[in-house]
Image: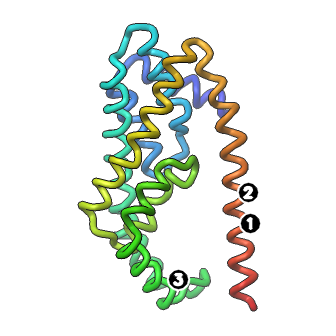
């Protein structure tokens, strides 16, 4: 299944160029697991082939990611917020904890959005809690764009340097993704245990 997704993604990007990179990153940033670890390195590979410009490929990925994140923020603010307010108690989220999250994003939202954009897996989903907590939208967009830029530069550059071997990045990042997911699961288990106590 993953191989098919990778194959379709690369074909799509190869045919649409910058628009393909932008659309792929918008999809990934809108909570759909289309890995940027495929999109951006393949864009870098196309740069190495002389088919794309490096800076424009990075910009396409960054703009696409920001647009997708804005859509995710909107989903969190318009749909997620009312859902949590109504059904949060059944999920172990009280109004007190929602207010705590609101205060967190009001105070630390800029840094949270910026730094989580540099982490695989988490970067895809951070827009939802930012939207649910209704972080200042303009600041959200600015820090999303700035935080996504190093990620876009790094992966596009790696794809450019690796050339035809760009796919080895998938193996490296897959192991990293597994470690992050395991850490998140452990954190969730600890949270549920702590709540029961």
Please name the residue that numbered disc 3 is placed on: 88
At 43% from the left and 43% from the top, the residue drawn is 27
Across and down, in percent, residue 68 comes to 37, 48
Q: Is mark 1 on a helix, strand or loop?
A: helix
Question: Rounded to the nearest whole Å, what is the CA distance between mark 2 and mark 3?
Answer: 24 Å
Q: Quadrant of residue 71?
A: bottom left
Q: In which quarter of the image is residue 111?
A: bottom left
Q: Position of residue 56 (x, y in %)?
A: 30, 25
Residue located 33% across and 32% down the image = 60
Compared across the picture, whether 68 is left or right of 32 comes to left
Q: Is residue 33 left or right of residue 179?
A: left
Looking at the image, residue 129 lies above or below residue 144: below
* Coordinates of residue 52 in the picture (x, y in percent): 35, 15
| Colour mode of the rendering | rainbow
Q: Where is residue 141 in the image (x, y as percent from the top left)?
A: 29, 55
* Residue at mark 2: 182
Give the alpha-carbon distance from disc 1 to disc 2, as whole Å: 6 Å
Q: Do the residues labelled 1 and 2 touch (CB within 8 Å)?
A: yes
Instruction: Please tell me how many numbered marks the rendered image carries.
Output: 3
> Closer to us: mark 1 or mark 3?
1
| Nearer to me, 189 or 89 | 189
Left-right relation of 180 to 139? right
Q: In which quarter of the image is residue 134?
A: bottom left
Label 3 secondary element: helix
Query: Which mark is nearer the camera, 2 or 3?
Result: 2
Q: Name the residue under label 1.
A: 186
- Quarter of the image with the N terminus in it: top right
Instruction: Return the residue nearer the eye: 92 or 181.
Output: 181
Q: Residues within 10 Å of mark 2 (few under 14, many from 20)?
A: few
Mark 1 burial class by Cα count in 10 Å: few <14, some 14-19, many 20+: few
Q: Which residue is pictured at 38% across the width and 27% down the height?
A: 20
């Amino acid at each position: 299944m993953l191989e098919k997704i990778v194959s379709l993604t690369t074909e799509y990007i190869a045919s649409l160029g910058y628009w393909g990179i932008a659309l792929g990153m918008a999809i990934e940033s809108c909570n759909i697991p289309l890995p940027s670890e495929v999109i951006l390195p393949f864009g870098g590979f196309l740069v190495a082939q002389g088919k794309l410009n490096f800076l424009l490929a990075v910009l396409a990925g960054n703009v696409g990611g920001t647009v997708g994140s804005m859509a995710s923020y909107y989903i969190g603010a318009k749909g997620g917020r009312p859902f949590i307010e109504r059904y949060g108690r059944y999920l172990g989220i009280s109004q007190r904890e929602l207010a705590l999250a609101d205060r967190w994003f009001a105070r630390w939202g800029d840094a949270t959005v910026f730094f989580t954009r540099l982490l695989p897996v988490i970067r895809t989903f951070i827009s939802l809690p930012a939207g649910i907590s209704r972080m200042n939208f303009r600041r959200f967009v600015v820090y999303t764009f700035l935080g996504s830029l190093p990620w876009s530069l790094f992966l596009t550059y790696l794809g450019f340097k690796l050339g035809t071997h760009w796919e080895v990045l998938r193996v490296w990042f897959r192991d990293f993704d597994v470690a992050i997911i395991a850490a998140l699961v452990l954190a969730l288990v600890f949270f549920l245990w702590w709540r029961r106590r």
